[in-house]
Image (cartoon, grey):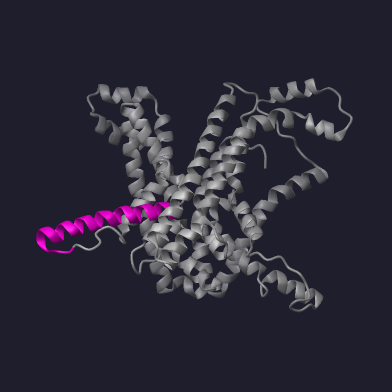
């Protein structure tokens, strides 16, 4: 799960350094062989194949987490029945095809695997930093090129609309798969006993589990760490401290705003459930599937219309120009974050409130407390862990967010993610390492929390 802490664009920058002509791999090849430039072939990381590799290494945990959960919820009795019904098979290929895993386990886990793939595809469509670093043309890079390169906001909006259609189609497929997955959860199961591997089987399983972590986390972190040591004096540089304060303050404000709105949404939905309130909750949580670039375009255009309308009215009525009240301010950026990451807050708060016993809340109401008093004096203190989890998840996601921040940030306002992008775009990868590594270190916090939560459950599997 460690690659979850790594933004894809930071992994891309690290691999550009690792695979570069002057990087450690090619330097080692030349030192060992005595070859020079043009004497040997070496794969180009700045390619479509390289982007597929980077995005696969970063986004595979989405599939892993959902598939792991699906396999752990399966009953051992299903595999025993499948083993008894297959009969004796002498051919190894026949034994594999007719095994309990292929006949039972994989079909039951297929909806969860498809849902994980849909999430990974949505994240791939939303990516900007990786494809930009590799010089690839996608809908996301087209949005930025139309906006910044050509100054055509209308064209950027059209591309954003096309990208939204793709994302909504994937979202429908993901939710359909999730509904199908719910049909296969038995009420009581006998968990599958893990098999203890020894010898070469143990080594092989360890190697297979290690490779994604090696390529998706360890190699990029080692490269960033080596670059950071070169520029270690810049950790206390005033520019870095200002960047860190801007980023932490912005992320903290977004986390507080989103968790507060999430509390209101979940409390209203649970107080008087209705189709309308459920629909509002569903709409509020759809933003995470929409790419940050699309949200940025929508927020910029909508707030721009609002600012122009207010400015026009003030000019006609009082002869005063208000200028841009919301566009290009932190308000626009926080609004975009709220749209993008509201689902993280709502799902965490809703999960916390779902664990409360209704009798406790009924007892508080019987004592004469108002609904608001019950919420602030009983409910919120009891779900403080869920609130902290929601705030931490939002905090880290805002820390890593690049496209929306790049478009909507106020003038002369930078964050760690934006500064990393700017330095890498100017081919100053060594200077970009310190802010990039800072993002990764902070991004490890939710991964650690998630790992602890999984450890408390079932420790089976790799």
Q: Position of residue 65 (x, y in %)?
A: 59, 41
Looking at the rendering, the stretch of residues picked out in magenta corresponds to 292-321
**Can see residue 24?**
yes
Q: Image quadrant of residue 361?
A: top left
Badge count: 0
The residue positioned 43% from the left and 53% from the top of the image is 158
Residue 371 percent coordinates (x, y) = 26, 30
- In the displayed structure image, the side of residue 416 where residue 115 appears, left or right: right
Front in this rendered view, residue 169 or 410: 169
Depth check, front residue: 137 or 176: 137
- In the displayed structure, would residue 418 be above or below residue 35? above
Give x and y (percent) for residue 108: 64, 29
Horizontal relation, residue 440 to residue 257: left or right: right
Residue at the left extreme of this rendering: 318
Q: Is residue 42 above or below residue 97?
A: below
- Name which quarter of the figure residue 314 lies in: bottom left
Q: Is the stretch drawn in magenta largely helix, strand or loop?
A: helix
* Residue 349 can be seen, yes or no: no
Asked whether residue 301 is drawn in magenta, I would say yes
Magenta stretch contains residue 150: no
| Quarter placement of the C terminus | top right
Q: Residue at x 61, y 48 (%)?
A: 60
Residue drawn 51% across the image and 70% down it: 425
Q: Is residue 458 left or right of residue 277?
A: right
Q: Nearer the viewer, residue 135 or 446?
A: 135
Residues 258 and 140: in front is 140
């Amino acid at each position: 799960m460690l690659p979850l802490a790594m933004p894809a664009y930071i992994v891309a920058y690290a691999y550009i350094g690792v695979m570069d002509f002057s990087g450690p791999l090619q330097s080692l090849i030349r030192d060992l062989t005595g070859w020079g430039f043009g004497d040997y072939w070496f794969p180009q990381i700045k390619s479509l194949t390289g982007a597929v590799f980077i995005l696969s290494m970063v986004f595979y945990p989405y599939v892993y987490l959902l598939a792991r959960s699906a396999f752990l919820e399966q009953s051992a009795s299903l595999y025993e029945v499948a083993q008894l019904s297959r009969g004796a098979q002498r051919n190894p290929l026949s034994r594999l095809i007719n095994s309990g895993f292929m006949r039972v386990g994989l079909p039951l886990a297929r909806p969860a695997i498809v849902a994980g793939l849909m999430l990974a595809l949505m994240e791939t469509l939303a990516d900007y930093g990786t494809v930009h670093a590799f010089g690839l043309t996608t809908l996301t890079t087209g949005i930025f090129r139309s906006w910044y390169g050509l100054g055509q906001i209308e064209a950027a909006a059209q591309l954003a609309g096309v990208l939204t259609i793709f994302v909504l189609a994937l979202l429908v497929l993901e939710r359909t798969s999730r509904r199908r997955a719910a049909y296969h959860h038995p009420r009581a199961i006998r968990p599958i006993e893990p098999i203890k591997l020894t010898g070469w089987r143990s080594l092989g399983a360890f190697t297979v589990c290690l490779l994604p972590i090696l390529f998706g986390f360890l190699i990029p972190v080692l490269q960033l760490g080596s670059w950071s040591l070169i520029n270690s004096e810049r950790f206390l540089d005033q520019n870095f401290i200002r960047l860190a304060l801007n980023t932490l303050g912005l992320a903290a404000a977004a986390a507080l705003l989103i968790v507060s709105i999430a509390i209101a949404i979940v409390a209203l939905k649970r107080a008087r459930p209705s189709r309308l309130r459920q629909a509002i909750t569903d709409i509020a949580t759809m933003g995470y599937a929409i790419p940050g670039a699309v949200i940025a375009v929508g927020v910029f255009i909508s707030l721009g219309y609002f600012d122009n309308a207010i400015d026009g009215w003030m000019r006609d009525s009082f002869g005063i120009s208000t200028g841009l009240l919301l566009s290009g301010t932190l308000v626009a950026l926080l609004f975009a974050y709220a749209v993008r990451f509201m689902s993280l807050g709502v799902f965490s708060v809703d999960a916390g409130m779902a664990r409360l016993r209704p009798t406790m809340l009924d007892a508080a109401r019987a004592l004469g407390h108002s609904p608001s008093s019950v919420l602030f004096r009983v409910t919120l203190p009891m779900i403080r862990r869920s609130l902290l989890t929601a705030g931490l998840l939002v905090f880290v996601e805002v820390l890593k967010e690049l496209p929306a921040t790049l478009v909507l940030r106020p003038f002369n306002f930078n964050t760690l993610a934006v500064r990393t992008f700017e330095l890498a775009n100017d081919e100053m990868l060594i200077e970009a390492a310190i802010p990039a590594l800072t993002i990764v270190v902070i991004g490890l916090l939710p991964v650690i929390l998630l790992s602890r939560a999984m450890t408390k459950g079932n420790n089976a599997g790799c």
